[in-house]
Amino acid sequence: MTVGYHRYFTHGSFKANRPLRIALAVAGGLAAQGSVIAWVADHRRHHAFSDREGDPHSPWLFGTSARALAKGFWHAHMGWLFERDVTNSERFAPDLLADRDIRTVDRLFIPLTVVSVALPGVLGGLITMSWWGAVTAFFWGGLVRIAFLHHVTWSVNSICHMVGSRPFTSRDKAANFWPLALLSMGESWHNSHHADPTGARHGVLRGQLDISARVIWIFEKFGWATNVRWPKPERLAAKRTAAAR
Ligand SMILES: [Zn+2]
Ligand SMILES: [Zn+2]
């Protein structure tokens, strides 16, 4: 999700060779968060209208009273999925629509989800040769894993647009929330990300853990990823807020 759907497909923070590109699309599909083209279109719309009318999941659309913020938190976290207006992929993801490989993986989203939910249970059953092994593996490796990752991703949309520090100027309320850095694999450095969306590293300041950036670095060492957009000190300095300088 973080390296593929988000940093690569949505923001083009590096170039991937064909096998990596397909593998990242499949891996993202297995997270069961939506087909690659729909996910990317939604997320590009989020950046285009960030925390303004048109953002599919901003917590700031209802006002700033305690009640409005509670409603906004719920909407940004998962409520938006139930009342959603479908994002126009032709407008927001024409590059992916034009790619045959990606269109194919996109169409396979439902089968990929079925595999992702069912495979742990099948493996658990086969490895232990018991129904109990199948049921517990299905529960933990299928349901809990998927639900847990969804909440981490949703927390970036909700918590990281409400709480945290804002060392960089961005047009929205995106914030860096350190407690989620490890679980979100670096995605919770969300203020830095909105300030410089195409950057391959979101944890750009000293000591900011960003596992996804390290994964991209490994892809680069293998030669699978090229043109990686690593942070440039002068670009970062220009975006620091006066208070953080
Ligand atoms: Zn955001
Ligand atoms: Zn983004």
Image (cartoon, rainbow, N blue to C red):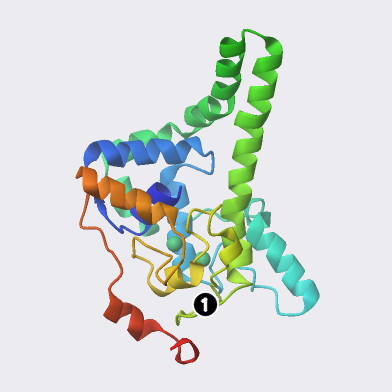
Is residue 137 at least partly visible in the picture? yes
Ligand 1 within 8 angstroms of badge 1 C-beta: yes
Q: Quadrant of the C terminus?
A: bottom left
> Please, is residue 96 above or below residue 12 in the view?
above
Which amino acid does the dot numbered 1 rest on?
A: Asp
Which residue is more in the foreground, 76 or 238?
238
Query: For residue 228, which quarter of the picture?
Result: bottom left
> Please, is residue 52 above or below residue 2 in the view?
below
Give x and y (percent) for residue 142.
61, 30
> Please, is residue 150 above or below residue 227 in the view?
above
In the picture of the structure, the residue carrying the numbered disc 1 is 172
Marks counted in the figure total 1
Q: Residue furthest front?
A: 207
Horizontal relation, residue 109 to residue 234: left or right:
right
Horizontal relation, residue 232 to residue 180: left or right:
left
Give x and y (percent) for residue 4.
38, 47
Q: Quadrant of ligand 2?
A: bottom left
Residue at 44 percent of width and 51 percent of height:
2
Residue at 48 percent of width and 56 percent of height:
42
